[in-house]
Image (cartoon, helix red, strand yellow):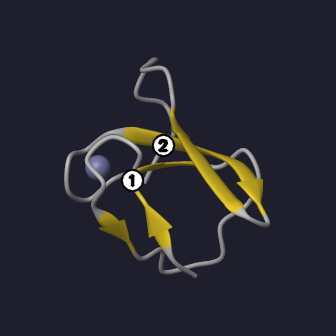
């Protein structure tokens, strides 16, 4: 699966299948990205809240 960070346009290569609503961090810029759609893949910067997402 191919993804691009909406913040830094860096290429993301998720190691696992993304799930709707999942939030993960961009390895390049560290932005928190939320998965808004899967087909096609749609990402948006997630509002920064408490660091409570583990990983
Ligand atoms: Zn990024």
Nearer to me, 2 or 20: 2
- Residue ID at (74%, 64%): 40
- Residue ID at (41%, 39%): 32
Q: Locate the C terminus by quadrant.
A: bottom left
Nearer to me, 42 or 32: 42
Disc nearest the viewer among 2 and 1: 1
Element on which disc 1 rests:
loop
When asked about the image quadrant of residue 50, the answer is: top left
Q: Is residue 46 above or below residue 31?
A: above
Q: Is residue 4 left or right of residue 46?
A: left
Q: Residues within 10 Å of mark 1 (few under 14, many from 20)?
A: many
Single out the residue that lies furthest toward the left.
28
Q: Locate the N terminus by quadrant.
A: bottom right
> Any mark on residue 5, and which?
1
Image location (x, y in percent) of residue 19: 73, 61
Image location (x, y in percent) of residue 43: 57, 48
Q: Is mark 1 within 8 Å of ligand 1?
A: yes
Image location (x, y in percent) of residue 8: 25, 47
Image location (x, y in percent) of residue 30: 25, 44
- Residue ID at (49%, 67%): 3
Q: CA distance from mark 2 to mark 1?
A: 8 Å
Element on which disc 2 rests:
strand
Q: Is residue 42 left or right of residue 53?
A: right
* Residue with the mark numbered 2: 33
Q: Is mark 2 within 8 Å of ligand 1?
A: yes
When asked about the image quadrant of residue 44, the answer is: top right
When asked about the image quadrant of residue 51, the answer is: top left
Q: Residues within 10 Å of mark 2 (few under 14, many from 20)?
A: many
- Residue ID at (72%, 44%): 21
Q: How many marks?
A: 2
Nearer to me, 17 or 11: 11
């Amino acid at each position: 699966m191919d993804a691009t960070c909406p913040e830094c346009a860096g290429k993301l290569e998720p190691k696992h299948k993304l799930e709707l609503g999942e939030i993960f961090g961009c390895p390049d810029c560290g932005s928190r990205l939320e998965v808004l759609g899967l087909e096609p893949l749609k990402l948006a910067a997630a509002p920064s809240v408490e660091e409570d997402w583990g990983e």
